[in-house]
Image (cartoon, grey):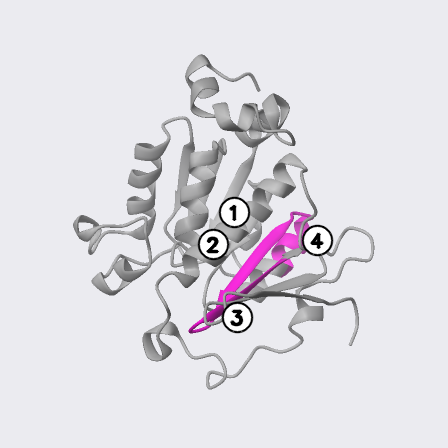
Amino acid sequence: MTLTPDESARYARHLVLKGIGGPGQQRIKAARVLVVGVGGLGSPVIAYLAAAGVGVLGAVDPDTVSLSNLQRQILFSDADAGALKTEGAERFVSAINPHVRFTAHPEWIDEDNAAGIIGGYDLVLEGTDSFPTKRLVAQACAAAKIPLVTGSLGQFDGALTVLMPYRGANPGFADLYPQDPSPEDSPPCELAGVLNVLPGVLGTMMANEALKLIVGYGEPLTGKLLVYSARSGETTVLRYGKGP
């Protein structure tokens, strides 16, 4: 995909960056990326992928913006309160980069629509706080042979990994999470709380994994779970594989 003069000026720092350059930026422009969950993790993912110039950026979320979201969901402002999150995300994306085509899916993803929604994209990022939804998205991506970057948050820590179980001996979601955690072990953030900068750190890391997969620089976190602690500022990478 040829870059316009405006795009060449906009992405100048990528064009001179070894490992991306013109060919890499063209791959970013040609990419079709879906973000499931426009919340704490989805916000920085959408912001950075839009700024990077992803050609088509889709977002799945049926929720509306509340004031309590503004502590960490950087796509929104007071003016978005009560509006659909996908509408607020679309306004943000059009303001930061008019070259990105945004596609809103203001519905929740379920067994009936997952394949139809995901099938229109070549990469998916998921950052919801529902383990059944995570498992469903992972299964749909595996069936469609689409890479998945999935992340989760605690109060002061978070984790992310890349799933491509259809390729070689790569493990899948069930290898990492054989069972969903109980509500007591994984309470929602409205009950447990969450540090406001934590989704920004993890979401930016997720966006980086997406760009790795699109462009081809570095090594994606396949078979690796990256765990970040905001208390210590440290990251730990745990390896996991197929089977028990």
Q: Which residue is mark 4?
A: 164
Report helix, strand or loop for mark 1. Answer: helix
Residue at the spot x=46%, y=86% of the render? 184
Q: Which residue is mark 2?
A: 203
For marks 4 and 1, the one nearer the N-term is 4
- Image marks 4 and 3: residues in contact by CB distance under 8 Å: no
For marks 2 and 4, the one nearer the N-term is 4
Foreground mark, 2 or 4, reads: 2
With 8 as the anchor, is 139 left or right in this view?
Answer: right
Q: Which residue is mark 3?
A: 131
Residue at the spot x=46%, y=56% of the render? 201
* Range covered by the magenta-colored residues: 139-161
Report helix, strand or loop for mark 4. Answer: loop
Number of residues whose C-alpha sits closer than 10 Å to that of mark 3, classed few (under 14), some (14–19) or many (20 or more): some
**Residue 205 seen:** yes
Q: Which residue is mark 1?
A: 207
For marks 4 and 3, the one nearer the N-term is 3
